[in-house]
């Protein structure tokens, strides 16, 4: 019986009959080589020069050096302080500063200098702003498009059931609209916090597609938090029912051994591959599934081969 057939998550304190490693030890497939060359430094220097934030840095993404070495990054707008205390995310929490009015132009300049054909824009959650930062998203999308002509993917917060804010971002007509589901309903409040709502996540994706059918909709989940196979596939079915077309599945990695939700299990690459095949057979048009897959990992490939 494979681990995919198990209804309950496996929590092991040592090597068990399943062959899985204890969650506190990093398995061999999660160890990465450092990319060679100077492109990594070029990207980091450019971002620093233009005063831009990335989720790569702030969320301690394991793909940071790989992406920077390929002269790409996922831009994080609206500052580097989030108003949501999510249990999985390394981004700083607290009271953010006011949005910077020239950030859209600086972002567009960075995308131009990096030669990006597909630009991914995400943000911290800004519950302190009446529109959650929707107008700033709109300005960033339009500025990047005007400067580069690149396709654009937004990875947004949930805007706390604010339909007008959502519509403002949609009106910028990004090629891809991504909003992460993150986990299964049973774990939602523990992982995403008290303000997040699973049903609104689904409704947000449905409304995006309803507003503009040309926009490709996308969502992603972190695995290894204790979800079961049945729970996972129930979520995938819900996403399809709400018009989601692109899917990412990746391994949750605990940013800090004390401050964040612990990893329950590490899924081996073979399991991710099987999950990806199953999701594709369910009806998702594009699926990226693997231990290092993140919301915007190789996002251009997913968007351009649609």
Image: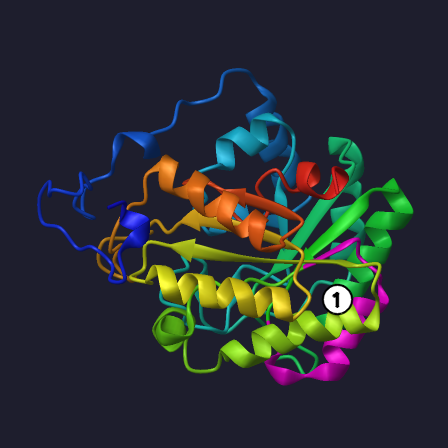
Asked if residue 140 is among those painted magenta in the image, a careful observer would answer no
Seen as rendered, the residue at the extreme front is 1
On the image, numbered disc 1 is attached to which residue? 136
Q: Left or right: where does residue 139 sit relative to residue 96?
A: right
Residue 264 in the image: above or below residue 110: below
Instruction: Tell me the residue at 9%/49% (across/down).
Output: 13
The answer to whether one can see residue 49 in this image is no
Instruction: Tell me the residue at 42%/23% (across/down).
Output: 34
Instruction: Tell me the residue at 46%/68% (across/down).
Output: 234
Residue 10 in the image: above or below residue 16: below
How would you rate the neighbour count of disc 1 (Cα within 10 Å): few for under 14, some for 14-19, many for 20 or more? Answer: many
Residue 161 in the image: above or below residue 249: below
Seen as rendered, the residue at the extreme top is 37
Asked if residue 171 is among those painted magenta in the image, a careful observer would answer yes
Q: Which residues are magenta?
A: 158-177
How many marks can you see? 1
Q: Position of residue 172 (x, y in %)?
A: 84, 63
Predominant secondary structure in magenta?
Answer: helix
Q: Nearer the viewer, residue 48 or 271?
A: 271
Q: Left or right: where does residue 88 sit relative to residue 120?
A: left
Q: Nearer the viewer, residue 212 or 271?
A: 271
Q: Nearer the viewer, residue 8 or 267?
A: 8
Q: Position of residue 90 (x, y in %)?
A: 40, 56
Instruction: Give the quarter of the figure containing the C terminus.
Output: top right
Considering the numbered disc 1 on the image, is that residue within a helix, a strand or a loop?
A: helix
The answer to whether one can see residue 167 in this image is yes
Instruction: Tell me the residue at 50%/73% (across/down).
Output: 83
Q: Position of residue 1 (x, y in %)?
A: 24, 46
Q: Left or right: where does residue 176 sit relative to residue 69?
A: right
């Amino acid at each position: 019986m494979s681990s995919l057939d198990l209804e309950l998550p496996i929590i092991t304190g040592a090597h068990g009959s399943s062959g899985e490693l204890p969650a506190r030890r990093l398995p061999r497939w999660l160890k990465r080589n450092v990319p060679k060359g100077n492109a990594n430094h070029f990207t980091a220097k450019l971002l620093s020069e233009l005063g831009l934030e990335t989720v790569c840095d702030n969320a301690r993404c394991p793909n940071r050096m790989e992406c920077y070495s390929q002269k790409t990054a996922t831009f994080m707008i609206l500052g580097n302080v989030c108003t949501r205390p999510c249990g999985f995310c390394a981004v700083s929490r607290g009271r953010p500063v006011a949005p910077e009015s020239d950030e859209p132009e600086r972002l567009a300049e960075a995308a131009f200098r990096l030669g990006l054909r597909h630009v991914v824009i995400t943000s911290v959650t800004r519950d302190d702003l009446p529109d959650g930062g929707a107008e700033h998203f709109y300005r960033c999308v339009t500025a990047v498009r005007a400067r580069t002509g690149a396709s654009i993917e937004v990875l947004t917060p949930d805007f706390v059931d604010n339909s007008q804010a959502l519509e403002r971002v949609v009106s910028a007509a990004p090629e891809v609209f991504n909003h992460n589901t993150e986990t299964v309903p049973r774990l939602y409040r523990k992982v995403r916090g008290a303000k997040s709502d699973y049903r609104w996540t689904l409704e947000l994706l449905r409304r995006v597609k309803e507003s503009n059918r040309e926009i490709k909709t996308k969502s992603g989940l972190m695995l290894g938090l204790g979800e079961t196979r049945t729970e996972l596939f129930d979520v995938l079915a819900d996403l399809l029912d709400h018009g989601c077309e692109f899917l990412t599945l990746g391994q949750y990695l605990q940013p800090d051994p004390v401050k964040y939700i612990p990893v329950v299990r590490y899924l081996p690459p073979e399991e991710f591959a099987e999950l990806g095949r199953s999701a594709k057979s369910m009806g998702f048009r594009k699926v990226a599934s693997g231990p290092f897959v993140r919301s915007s990992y190789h996002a251009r490939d997913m968007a351009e081969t649609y």
